[in-house]
Amino acid sequence: MPISDQDAVDACARLIAFAVLLQALELFQLRRAFAHGGIWTWEVLRDEFAIFPGIVRAPLGLFLGYPRFLFVIFAQTALAVSVLIEPREHPAVFLGLLAATALVSLRWRGSFNGGADYMTVLVLLALSVEACFRGHAAVRHGCLWYVAVQTALSYAMAGAVKLRNAGWRSGRALARFLSGPPYEPPEACAALARRPGLMRMSSWGIMLFEVSFPLGLTSPTACAGVLAAALVFHLLNVAVFGLNRFVFAWLAAYPALLYCSAP
């Protein structure tokens, strides 16, 4: 049964709110690292913002210094819980959640956890626009398509980059990831990494899955198939590399893909 545009937006909102809530809780657990005497203090990082004019640096220092940065995390938490409870919240709630998440990204000089943070901002941006023009079906439709296309391209481009890399085509790159630093995967993975044939086959499986991901937009059946494969792919990354943020950030975009795949 096809998903409606409003149901897709509501599902995206709840899923991204859950993702942001987890991200905020993770940062709160790491608060000693960016507190006074930690390794990520604002006093060290703020020098990199010297390229901005003073009118920009002043508010950044107000929000990103410790302990004030904790209030940004608390705001993220409260706003995320609000959207979890009511996905059709006031536009100000979505704009606040987007602003708080953007501030967190700035605090870490771009992102804390790479692509997962960018996907979080992307979904929040689309939902904020939809909330500001709530009731306009064309805007809602466009926001869902924006999320769907960007998500499909994120997989396809990742696969295309790997295909151009000889190490990925031979399986050596995957073997290096599974055999040790920087992610320190389970010891069982090291044994798998010593099997060149398996590594080559697995590498090609990953690359072909990623580059073919946009085909999921051609029909609901194809979409269900690629999304199931993608979910398994992300869960394996959690088990092997501990990349838990990727699961929830990309999962929040899946309702948009399901909606856009329907004729």
Image (tube, helix red, strand yellow):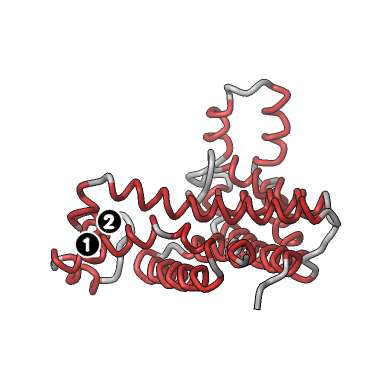
Q: Quadrant of residue 1?
A: bottom right
Q: Quadrant of residue 106?
A: top right
Mark 1 to mark 2: distance in Å?
7 Å
Image spot of residue 79 (x, y percent): 76, 59
Q: Which label is found at residue 179?
A: 1
Q: Amino acid at mark 2?
A: Pro
Identify the residue at horizontal 51%, vertical 44% (top origin).
40
Seen from the viewer's position, the closer of residues 232 and 189 is: 232
Whether pointer 1 and pointer 2 mark residues with C-beta atoms closer than 8 Å, the reply is no
Nearest the eye: 158 or 260: 260
Report the amino acid beneath label 1. Answer: Ser
Few, some or many C-alpha atoms within 10 Å of disc 1 (few <14, some 14-19, many ≥20)?
A: many
Q: Residue at x 53, y 55 (%)?
A: 151
Q: Residue at x 50, y 55 (%)?
A: 152
Task: Give the tally of numbered discs.
Answer: 2
Secondary element under disc 1, as helix, strand or loop, is loop
